[in-house]
Each structure stands twice: as structure tokens, then as C-alpha cells.
Image (tube, rainbow, N blue to C red):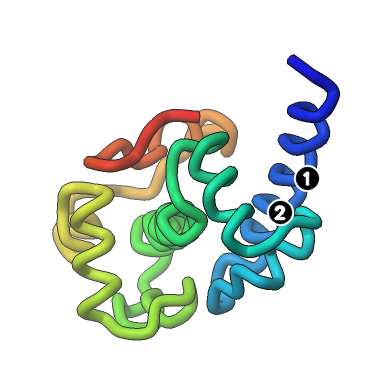
Amino acid sequence: MSREAEERNRRLLRARDAMDRCYADPLDVRAVAAVAHVSPAHFSRTFRQVFGESPHRYLQRRRVERSMFLLRDTDRTITEICFDVGFGSVGTFSRTFKGIVGRTPSDYRAGTEPIVTPHCVQLATMRPSGPGVRPN
């Protein structure tokens, strides 16, 4: 791998880490691109090339991953979870959740019990793998 590609990937990883930290905030591509020191258009294009999905889709998947934990391990309402993880409406949350997980949030909650395993194992086994999601 060339030095330029390594540096590009390092900057994109920093930007992705920033998205992970602020997953519940609205996606501001301009601000995240600034973390990577590139233009918003170049950021979106190279993010998709490197990670296999757009920044928006990545953020949606991260929000769904977090909501899966909250649905499984808390008794908070689906509406509360929807807004806490950064979705603007319950309809969008439910549609996105079903598209990624394959079940509605209420079906997921009803059919899933809290997991009593190490966190690293949970992350590896519970990662969504629905349509449009490619493994990293």
C-alpha cells in the first residue's frame, strides 16, 4: 500500500471514529470531511470506496446497532430509543431497522433476551448483516 493510501485511510478512520462518538447527532458531512481534511464530495466518494458504504448508511447502521442493545437490555420505549440514537421519526427508525436487521424493532425486542457474554463477543455476533451491509 502506498504512503498516500495509508494516510488517506488514517484520515478516514479518524473521521469514522468521530462519527462513532457522535452517532446520535445529525450527520454534518462538511464537518466530518473537515476531520479527514478533504472536501465533502471527496469524503463521501472515498468513504464509500474504503468502507463499502456511504457515510450516511454507515451512520444509520451504527444507530441501529446501538438501538439493538437498548431494545435488548433496557425497557425504554421504542420511541425513546428512536430519538436517543439520532433518528428523527419512529417511521424512519422502524423502516431503517427492518432494512438492516430484517425484523421490526418490536419483533426484535420480543424475540431477543439480554446477552450475558463479553462485550467483544456481542459485537462480533450481533453485527447486522442485512441487505446493503458489507462486513468490514
Q: For the residues labelled 2 and 1, say whether their Cβ atoms are less than 8 Å apart.
A: yes
Where in the figure is residue 60, as x and y percent of width and height? 41, 60
Q: Residue at x 69, y 61 (%)?
A: 39
Is residue 54 placed above or below 4 in the rendered structure?
below
SS for callout 2:
helix
- Left or right, 40 with respect to 38, comes to left
Query: Which of these two is toward me, 36 or 81?
Result: 36
The kind of residue on which mark 1 rests is: Arg
Q: Which residue is disc 2 drawn over?
A: 15
Q: Please tell me in which quadrant of the rendered image residue 4 appears.
A: top right
The kind of residue on which mark 2 rests is: Ala
Where in the figure is residue 10, as x and y percent of width and height? 78, 38
Where in the figure is residue 98, as x and y percent of width and height? 19, 57
Q: Which residue is disc 1 drawn over?
A: 11
Query: Which of these two is toward me, 38 or 130?
Result: 38
Is residue 13 placed above or below 62 in the rendered structure?
above
Q: State how many labels appear.
A: 2
Q: Disc 2 versus disc 1: distance between alpha carbons?
A: 6 Å
Task: Single out the residue that lies furthest toward the top.
Answer: 1
Specify the quadrant that holds the N terminus.
Answer: top right
- Left or right, 80 with respect to 7, comes to left
